[in-house]
Structure formats: C-alpha cells, structure tokens
Amino acid sequence: MFEELTQKLELVFKKLRGQGKITEANIADSLREIRRVLLDADVNYKVVKQFIDDVQKRALGQEVLQSITPGQLIIKIIHDELSKLLGVSKAEIAFAPLPPTVIMVTGLQGSGKTTFCAKLANHFKGKGHYPILVAADIHRPAAIDQLEMLGRQIQVPVVVERNKGAVEIAEESIEQARKGARDVVIIDTAGRLHVDEEMMREVETIKAKVSPHEILFVVDSMTGQDAVNSAKAFHDRLDFDGIVLTKLDGDARGGAALSVRAVVNEPIKFASVGEKLDALEPFHPDRMASRILGMGDVVTLVEKVQQQVDEQKARKLEEKLRKAEFTFEDFFDQLQEIKKMGPLQQVLGMIPGMNRLPADVSLDDHALVHVEAIIQSMTREERRKPHIINGERRRRIALGSGTSVQEVNKILKQFGEMQKMMKRFSKGRLPHMFQGMGMPV
C-alpha cells in the first residue's frame, strides 16, 4: 500500500533527520522535495499547495527552529497535517433510528463497487447486523450474477428482479427487508465506464425514492486524478455522505486517496485492502498517515490479531512457550493464523520500520508457500522432534515439498534458532508484545 510514495518520503525524512540544525532554507528544500513526491503520486495540485503551505506555517515556528530534534518535529508536523488532509478522525456510518438503514453504493464500473457491497454486508454481519443486498445495477447482467455469487459466499440474501427497473427494485427491497427482519439494506447501483447523464438521472431517482441514510461513493485508488474528477461529478449531483477507497492492496500511487477527501470535503469511511471478502477496514486517517509515512500501524495490527486469535489456543501456545515445547506443528498453526490476517506484505507493513528493509528481501505470501510445503512433507514425529531429521529424511522432505535440501536445511536452522530464543524467554517472562496482541501472559 503506497510503497513507492512511502519510499520516496522516507528519503526526504532521512535527510531531515540528518540535519544538525534546521533553518528556513533546509525546511524549504525538504518541502520542495515533498511537493515533488506528492505531485509524482498524482495528488491534486491544489491539494498539494494547501498541504505544503500548512506544513510550512507550522514548521517555521520558533518551537521547531529551537528544538533539539527539529527533524523529528517536522516529521510529526507532516504526519499531523497528513492526518488532517485524510479527515482527522474516523467517520462512522449513520444508522437509522428505526431499521432498516438504507445504504446506496455508487461509483464507476470497474471501481470494485459490487465487491465492496458484499464486503460491507459481510462487515455488518460480523458486527451482529442482518444485511440484505440489492442488485440494482440492471445495465450490466454480470453485476447481478456477481452479487448473487458473493451473497451466497457470505450467506446474505440478495434481492434480484431481472424484469424490473432499477428504481422499482430499490423501492421494493425496503419492504422485503422489513418482512425479512433485515436491518441494513445495501443497494448496488449502476456503474459506467465514465460519468454519463443517463446513469446520473437513474441514481438521482433512486435517491429521491428510497431516501437512503447513507450514500457511499467508491473510488478506485489506482486511477489517480480520474477518480477525483468522477467523485466531484457524483458529489455535485448526489451530495454523497462518504468515500470508499478500493484496491489499496494494488500498485496505488496514493493520488486519489490523498486528494478525493479534500476536493469533495466528505470523509473516507472504508478502505478495501485485499481481494477476500473480509478485507475491508474502517478508515482511520491518523493510522493511514502513519502507514504512508512508513511509521507502521501497530493499533490496526493488534486489532487484527485480537480478531483472529482463539483465546484457548493462545493459552495453550503460551504454556508451550513457557515450557520450551514449541514444535513445527505449532509453527504451522501460527502461519495459518497470520494468513487469516491478510496478505503478508500488508501485515508486515503495519510494523514500524519494515519499509526500511533491503529491496531484495521477499515479504510476499509466496515466501510462506515453501515453508508450509516443507512442514507438511514431514511426518508427525519429525514435526514434534526436528532433531531426528537426518540427511536421508531431509532429502525425502525436499522431494515431497518440491524444494531443495538447502531450503530444508535453512528452515531447520531457522527453527532451531527460534527454539533457542523461546528457551531463553521461558526462563523469565515472555515478551510484552504477546500482551499487546491479546495473548494472555
């Protein structure tokens, strides 16, 4: 997420940290570099100008010029202003006092709008709500089929009426929700490859007829200024309530994310961070600013761990760690837990400092495939007692996992080092990070 933007900003910050004394001249140089980086990321030029002006006003204050760590202080100012640019605080969905809450989802074709509808339904379902999906994008038959398929995957009902108009479908879905005791209605409206009058009239009519409590506009984070232009056009006609950023797990330069909220002055409410239907996060401006600046996002990481970790399993694991009985079976189980939290690159990106690793270090999910294959090619006894794995066993494991003996040796060596570390921890208290991640210590 924003890797290129993060890396370029990190180079600017490295120069700032190296300055023994901050002057107006080197502040101006740094801000000039930041301006160039943001424009390269396709951030709206007006947004860039305002951002740089705001940072400069604060950076030239006496507090910074007289500080013993001026570089760090300027980086904090940039973080604060970036958080402000992204929306200051988390924006919640406005639920209706009397159910159902009607949410209308709009956006251009290809923005990930239909998939987002299913992700949002899955998100609400996980929060104890009873959502229903509405296939009101009748102009693209594939959208109806896609929503039906996604609804089956998350076990959420989908309103489909192939012989009726979009407005009529949307109206009737409210009554169906009431009859089915569904408290959230999510309407997937028509998308086009570009903004056109016919589509605009249709979504305006749906809005007038169903009076949605929330209108969300879906933005493809990979489209840069085009996304900002379409967001403005939709906002002028619909006055939507919030923005959704999709495809943040792709090669997003960051322009749309950093521009769209400032241009339409509406909050970003959700970020889609992966292809899976649970890869949806409520948008926290301060946390996103930290990620963009390479500071990680430990709070979100801890929340993800707390959602995925089974407390009973965690207690058993902690007991094994105390007794230094951590085996390859336990290691394999932990790999599965990590995979549930999302793509490895994304999870590691939440850890401060990971952006400074050498470029040739592999951090993607493919790095885990060989490890899993090697562990699965071991017998149960070998997983529990790795010390018995001799040369002949190593050759068999390599053959069974489609890897080399060298790779097997590497995994065994790394696991041996891990076990030694666990033994050292078992003599005292376990690291505090286990407490922070919701593991009982």
Image: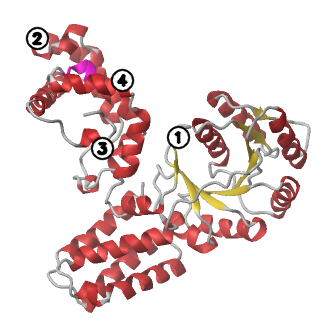
Disc marking residue 275:
1
Which of pointers 2 and 3 lies earlier in the amino acid sequence? 2
Question: Secondary structure beneath disc 3?
Answer: helix
**Which residue position holds label 3?**
436
Task: Find residue 175 and report its horizontal and vertical position in percent.
Answer: 86, 40
Distance Cα–Cα, label 4 vs label 1: 29 Å
For the C terminus, the image quarter is top left
Mark closer to the chain start, 2 or 4:
4
Image quadrant in which you'd find residue 200: bottom right
Q: Residues within 10 Å of mark 1 (few under 14, many from 20)?
A: some
Foreground label between 2 and 4: 4
Residue 312 circle label: 4
Image location (x, y in percent) of residue 134: 77, 41
Give the Cα distance between marks 1 and 3: 28 Å
Expressed as whole percent of the image width and height from the top left, the position of residue 272 reads 54, 49
Q: Are marks 4 and 3 in contact (CB under 8 Å)?
A: no
Which circle, 2 or 3, is nearer the viewer? 3
**Left-right relation of 375 to 177:** left
- Segment tinted magenta in the rendering: 326-331
| Residue closer to the observer: 89 or 380 | 89
Name which of mark 4 and mark 1 comes first in the sequence: 1
Q: Amino acid at mark 4?
A: Gln
Task: Say which of marks 4 and 1 sits in front.
Answer: 4
Quarter of the N terminus within the rendering: bottom left
> Residue 218 magenta-drawn?
no
At horizontal 62% and vertical 44% (from top left) the residue drawn is: 120
Judge from the rendering whether residue 304 lies leftward or rightward of residue 232; answer left or right: left
